[in-house]
Amino acid sequence: MRVNVRIHPTADVSDAADIGEGTSIWHQCQIREDTHIGKNCIFGKGVYVDFGVQIGDNVKVQNYVSIYHGVEIEAGVFIGPHVCFTNDNLPRAINPDGSLKAADDWVLGRILVKRGAALGANSTILPKVVIGEWALVGSGAVVTKDVPPHGIVVSNPARLIGFACACGHRLVAGEEKDGMMMAVCSKCNELVPIPLDTWRKVK
């Protein structure tokens, strides 16, 4: 039973999708079977959510995002317009003999987006990637490998250029302590520990 869920008349939502209280699904979305969507989520126009996708509470998904099978999104994630999550590292429509590939004739590549992360418009997330808590993915970035917690990545392929506070502002170098950089938020002065080896990967 769906409690206080708003589904626009133009949306196509499977009866077998589990949708949490307070969630809004807007124009022309498609939500497939066996999907779990948490509480108080917002899905903008034209979003596609494939079967079996797992989405936590308080997630915002902007217009025309594609979330394919094998994706898990934790609570509080922001997904900008036209973001695409992929799930096949070796995509082919046909086999070498020219026959059409079957639905089970490929290897699923999973994606995990952790709590509080934000993905900019038109970014593409390749399979077998973990995006860490409070990470920021720049608009148009192509993410081919894991993004560390609080990491800021941009470009194609995405590269690490810095670190962000949970409030979204840049972290700056603070005191080094016990193998950690005690980074400081440039806006709210929050201290955020980042492993030194990770801090030094910034390009």
Image (cartoon, rainbow, N blue to C red):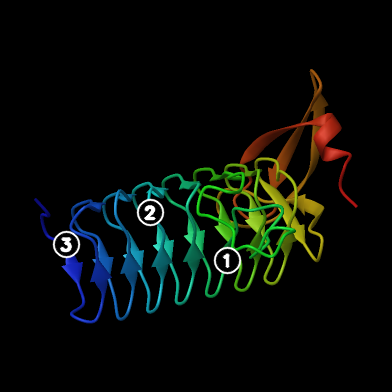
Q: Amino acid at mark 2?
A: Phe
Looking at the image, residue 176 sits to the left or right of residue 61; the answer is right
- Foreground of the two, 70 or 63: 70
Q: Element under label 2?
A: loop
Q: Position of residue 133 (x, y in %)?
A: 57, 42
Spatial CA distance of label 2 from label 1 is: 15 Å
**Classed neighbour count for the residue bearing mark 2: other residues with Cα under 10 Å, few (<14), some (14–19), many (≥20):** many
Res. 51 mark: 2
In the rendered structure, which disc, 2 or 1, sits on the residue that comes first in sequence?
Answer: 2
- Foreground of the two, 88 or 161: 88
Q: Which residue is mark 3?
A: 5
- Foreground of the two, 40 or 15: 15
**Classed neighbour count for the residue bearing mark 1: other residues with Cα under 10 Å, few (<14), some (14–19), many (≥20):** many
Q: Element under label 1?
A: strand
In the rendered structure, which disc, 1 or 3, sits on the residue that comes first in sequence?
Answer: 3
User: What's the residue at 37%, 46% (across, down)?
Assistant: 56
Q: Which residue is mark 1?
A: 84
Q: Position of residue 102 (x, y in %)?
A: 53, 55
Res. 157 mark: none
**Classed neighbour count for the residue bearing mark 3: other residues with Cα under 10 Å, few (<14), some (14–19), many (≥20):** some
In the rendered structure, which disc, 2 or 3, sits on the residue that comes first in sequence?
Answer: 3
Q: Position of residue 19 (x, y in %)?
A: 23, 53
**Figure quadrant of residue 150:** top right
Q: Are marks 1 and 3 in contact (CB under 8 Å)?
A: no
Q: In this rendering, which labeled residue sits more in front, label 2 or label 3?
A: 2
Q: In this rendering, which labeled residue sits more in front, label 1 or label 3?
A: 1
User: What's the residue at 45%, 77% (across, down)?
Assistant: 63
Q: Amino acid at mark 3?
A: Val
User: What's the residue at 55%, 74% (across, down)?
Assistant: 82
Q: Position of residue 164 (x, y in %)?
A: 67, 51
